[in-house]
Structure formats: structure tokens, C-alpha cells
Amino acid sequence: MGAKEELLQAITELEEEKSYTLVKKVLDEGVNPKEIIDILRKGVEIVGERFNKKEYFLTELVMSGEIFQQSAKILETAMKEGSETSESLGVVVIGTVKGDVHDIGKNIFVTLLQAAGFEVHDLGVDIAAEKFINKVKETKADIVAYSGLLTVALDSMKETTEALKSAGLRGEVKIIIGGLPVDEMWMKEVGADAYTDNAFKGVKIVTNWLREG
Ligand code: B12
């Protein structure tokens, strides 16, 4: 088995240290960082499929995200040095809304978005409307994503959409909401365009939006 195949296997088997060693090895062998990212993406995708089939659990999903993030950091410098600029599928601004600090699910969604090729600006947790607005302006985002697990997150999500409207930005972006309690009623109250409590579905939804233009 070549180093690239070994890397894919290490990710899908969640062998953290081995994955990082192999990322460095294939990089040293002259493999294009973009190709390595594709291997990492494939690895996270396979873990996701196993999670959906209930062969893997949340811990494995979180771990694959961690391996992806850390490996991407190793590659970051090499990617910056290379002249190529990898084209992003679209720009997403995401955060856990004000009053809420739950971020495990948000981080999974962020990893999957990055793995799918989106440029993601993750604001973090307990994010007030104003911060979303500023980031959307700064990045000319296509998509705004709110995460929230607490009931109080509903009000914060509503406030953020209202603020986007007041800033004249609502027509410029699509809004997706996610987290444990979200449903159609929340989506309507919040004035969002889509909702899901499944990060994989979320990626499909936003990918379709951008394909449709
Ligand atoms: C872990 C946890 C915590 C951790 C959070 C650590 C962290 N870094 O996130 C800590 C200990 C800090 C915590 C604190 C609190 N928690 Co808490 N917590 C949980 C717990 C056990 C698991 C949440 C979790 O991570 N699930 C796993 C992830 C993967 O699932 P997920 O978030 O739903 O994400 C998935 C999807 O929803 C989706 N997704 C998530 N976000 C987004 C966003 C987008 C855009 C998309 C597309 C998809 C997406 O992707 C993920 C994968 O598919 C839940 C109980 C439960 N069963 O959910 C309670 C729970 C959410 N917590 C609760 C409460 C009450 C609290 C506290 C108020 C407790 C307290 N008294 O202090 C504080 C609040 C702090 C605050 N201000 O936010 C309640 C909420 C009740 C409510 N209706 O409001 C719950 C439901 C527990 C309960 N049954 O009472 N909590």
C-alpha cells in the first residue's frame, strides 16, 4: 500500500498520530497539498457514512473532524507557499448564537463544510447579531449559519435575522439554522431558509443552494 492509501486508511480508522505523520510524509514526497486535502475529505466522508450507518458514534465523528482540522493546519503553510489558490465553493459565516455556548455540533458542521470545499468563517460561541453582520459585510458571505441548542437561542436567532434585514443584507444571503431543537416552526420564526439537525444534510442543502446560483 502506498503512503496515500495508508493515509486514507489511517483517517478512517481514526489513527490520529499516524495520520499526521503520513500527511507530512506524503507532503515530503511532493504530493500536491490539494490532493492531500482531497484524501482528508474522502476520509471524513467515509467516517460520516459509517456514522450514518451507526457503525461509528459521535466520538469517532468528532475525532475525524479533529484529524481533518489538525492535518489542514500542517498543510496550511505549504498551501500558502504554493502559487495555486484553491477555489472555494462559497463563503459561509457561522456561529453559535448569543446566550448559547454549545459548539460540538457546530464544529462538526464547520469541518464538513471545509471538507466539502467551503470557505468558512467560524465566529465561535455566544455570538451577538452585530458580530454576524460585521463578518457578513467583511467577507461578502453567501450563507449565514446559526447554531443553537438552548431554547433561548430562538430569540437570538430572530434578533440576528432582524439585524441582517436592518443592515440591508438579508437579500444577499441564505440562512440555515441547525442544532438540537430546530424545526420548521423555528425556521419560520427565525426567518431562515432551511433548518436541519443533521450536519451532513446541512452540507447538502448549502451545496445545492450554491449550485442553483
Ligand atoms: C454537551 C452539552 C453541554 C456542554 C457543551 C460543551 C460544548 N463545547 O458544546 C456544556 C456542559 C458546556 C453545557 C452547558 C449547558 N447546557 Co448543555 N448539553 C450538552 C448535551 C449533553 C450534548 C450536546 C451536544 O453536543 N450534542 C452532540 C452534537 C453533535 O449534537 P448537536 O449539537 O445537535 O449537533 C448536530 C446537529 O444538530 C447539527 N448542527 C449543530 N449545529 C448546527 C448548525 C447548522 C447551521 C447546521 C446545518 C447543523 C448543525 O450538526 C450536529 C451533527 O449532526 C445536551 C443534551 C443533548 N442530548 O443534546 C445538553 C443540553 C443542550 N444542555 C442543556 C442545558 C440546559 C445547558 C445549561 C443551561 C446547563 C446549566 N444549567 O448550566 C448550560 C448552558 C450553557 C450555555 N449558555 O450555553 C439542555 C438544553 C435545554 C433547553 N431546551 O434549553 C440540554 C438539551 C440538556 C437537557 N436535556 O436539559 N451543555
Image: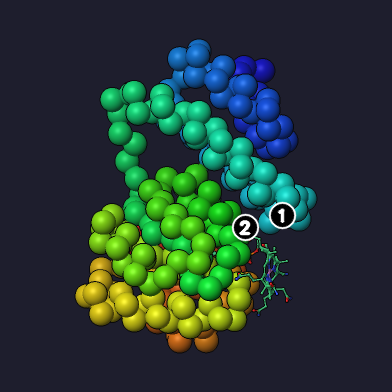
Label 2 packing within 10 angstroms: few (<14), some (14-19), many (20+): few
Helix, strand or loop for disc 2: helix
Query: Is residue 119 in view from this perspective?
Result: yes
* Residue annotated with mark 2: 104
Query: Depth-wise, is mark 1 or mark 2 nearer the camera?
Result: 2
Vertical relation: 52 (above or below) 154: above
Q: Is mark 1 within 8 Å of ligand 1?
A: yes
Which x, y percent locates residue 21? 62, 21
Query: Is residue 205 in view from this perspective?
Result: no
- Left or right: where 62 falls relative to 81: right
Helix, strand or loop for disc 1: helix
Residue farthest toward the right in the current orientation of the protein: 55
Q: Are marks 1 and 2 in contact (CB under 8 Å)?
A: yes
Quadrant of the frame with the N terminus: top right
Foreground residue, 201 or 171? 171
Q: Residue at x 61, y 22 (%)?
A: 22
Quadrant of the frame with the C terminus: bottom left
Q: Residue at x 35, y 28 (%)?
A: 80
Label 1 packing within 10 angstroms: few (<14), some (14-19), many (20+): some
Question: What kind of residue is marked 2?
Answer: Ile
Foreground residue, 52 or 176? 176
Residue farthest toward the left in the current orientation of the protein: 168
- Left or right: where 142 falls relative to 50: left
